[in-house]
Amino acid sequence: MSTQTHSPRPEHPAPPGGEGPLSPPGTSPLPLGTRLGGDVVEGVLGSGGFATVYRVRGPEGHVSALKLLPLEEGDERAARAWREMALGTRLRHPNLVRQLGAGQWPLDKPRFVWLKLELIEGPTLDEWAPGRTVGEVVERVLEVARALAVSHEAGVLHRDVKEANILVRESTGQAVLVDFGVGYHPAYPTLTKGMFPPGTLPYRAPEAWAYGRAHAGEPGAHYRAGPGDDLYALGVVLYRLLTGRFPFRPAEHGGEDVEAVLHREPLPPHLVNPRVPLEVEAVCLRLLAKTPEARYPGAVALCRALEELRARTDVDWTVVPHPERRLPEKPRTRGWRELAAVGLGLAVALAAWWLTPGQEVAPAGPAPEPVRAVAAPPAEAPRKDNAPVKPKQPQTSGPQPEAAPKRRGAAVRTACLGLTGAALQACMSAPQQVPPERPAPPPQACPAGAVETMTGTLGLRIGELSAVDWSDVRGRPVHVHEDSPLYVPGDWEAGADLDPAHRGEKVALPNNTRLSGRLYVKEGRVYGRYTEARTPLGVTYPVCLELWDTDGHFGLELRPGSAPGKMMVDPVVRVRVVDRFK
């Protein structure tokens, strides 16, 4: 997994400082304040199948990521932990994650190996990429190539180069290659028991697939990766950054189309995306050549080619491959005087909405911290004492929703935090807007074959709950629409929620599986029905999943900033496996 500060998408999620799937099965997170390797645990950054990663603070106040790998899970896992530690001591470069220390814990009877790693603040490469120029994309790939050049010169192969293992450091804007959990150096014994080393299938080089075909069924056959494998994987990364898709489509059965990888040329990037410069396309296609010899002689030669390419003046480096996905600008930091003005603006805007039917309080897009959902005040906001009387809304037939549920009142109070005096009074007097309610869909059966697919093919159980998310945003509500998809953050292990004894036996839905469905609002809460799951490799399954909150309640509470046509909800929620929609 990646060394970062949040869960990434689409490879998602990758915890900070960690490499490889995380979290020791059957163990609880260490309590805050635990001393480990001379550092104090401040919180959990991520967890998965192999380890848990903690945010720790050293005696001098320096914050790092500390990865804890269990020794009792078997000799191979322990050996990988020690090998990862040894590989880290060989690598020093600005574009490589730094290992700061390692050891065993507890000292008297060790049960874990710990690796202390540099904490990289920043998104994964695919999270960073939308809205970036071709010039910026080439710069990031060049930085990864430099990291590989240093790594290969030290005799270390990464063997899992992909966007989720490349972070863009916020402080410098440079790419950092992380996650050497499946790395290799000839000085250390081979740990892989199967034919192929661990890795991610769409990034596997053609020569690896060719070896697998030639030695299928041969006892003891084991493919030995080389520098060309890392370069091919970087070519896949570049292709995806330029086109938004993999070089080869999945096979009909949903797996890798090995025949295409071995014998067909990928569609030239400029045919997939006409904005891609031909000069950049040429480098990408050479990296995706069928044999290592047809690629660049090594990472150093790739660096030289990219540096020469970047120096050319006949290429339009300002082209944005995906302008429709441009990220919003990061708001500048505001001083306390500006925040006071923002607070007053919030009060005036809310008051103006109270006086104007249908006025939306929260503008689209990100709002400055710490006050959110701020609308620009009108030139002259009318005073409440001389405002016109609001006309009555026409009466509608049928049962009416509650005028002001307790949840809604709490949301208004949350939005008014930090205001005082008249501003606070105006804020509290403004009711919280919620999206218009539509008739709730009646109870209905699941899609055809969904129950059989979930319980048979996927191994899920009726009533099972699993955490999912809408985005990588954490700590604040996100804006969702009626058809906003959810994503599985990390592998959904079949039965993990109901039967811990069988946790990890089978992955039902892989990391970044997309869940499609519909949302609706009723009595101030958001409900959802999800009927299709699509894996990153394109396999689709009919499913029957209902939306629950993280506290175990059916549906979600609307958050401050909600308005007509705009649902603001928590970024992380849960879905429940059902055999019929309520």
Image (tube, helix red, strand yellow):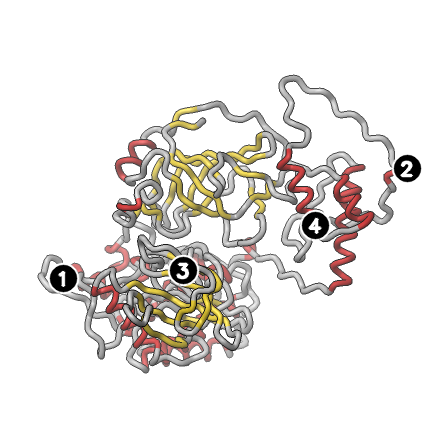
Q: Is residue 101 among the parts visible in the rendering?
A: yes
Quadrant the C terminus occupies: top left
Q: Residue at x 29, y 71 (%)?
A: 108
351 vs 518, left or right, is right
Of badges 4 and 1, the one in the foreground is 4
User: CA–CA distance between discs 2 and 1?
Assistant: 86 Å
Disc 4: which residue: 417
Circles 3, 2 touching at the beta carbon (< 8 Å): no
Seen at 30% across and 42% down, the residue is: 499
Helix, strand or loop status at disc 1: helix
Q: Residues within 10 Å of mark 4 (few under 14, many from 20)?
A: some
The answer to which of marks 2 and 4 sits earlier in the sequence is: 2
Q: Position of residue 81 (x, y in %)?
A: 29, 69
**Residue type at mark 4?**
Leu
Q: Residue furthest right?
A: 386
Residue that label 3 marks: 30
Quickly name the residue at label 2: 386
- Is tag 3's residue or tag 2's residue first in the polypeptide sequence? 3
Cα–Cα gap, marks 2 and 4: 27 Å
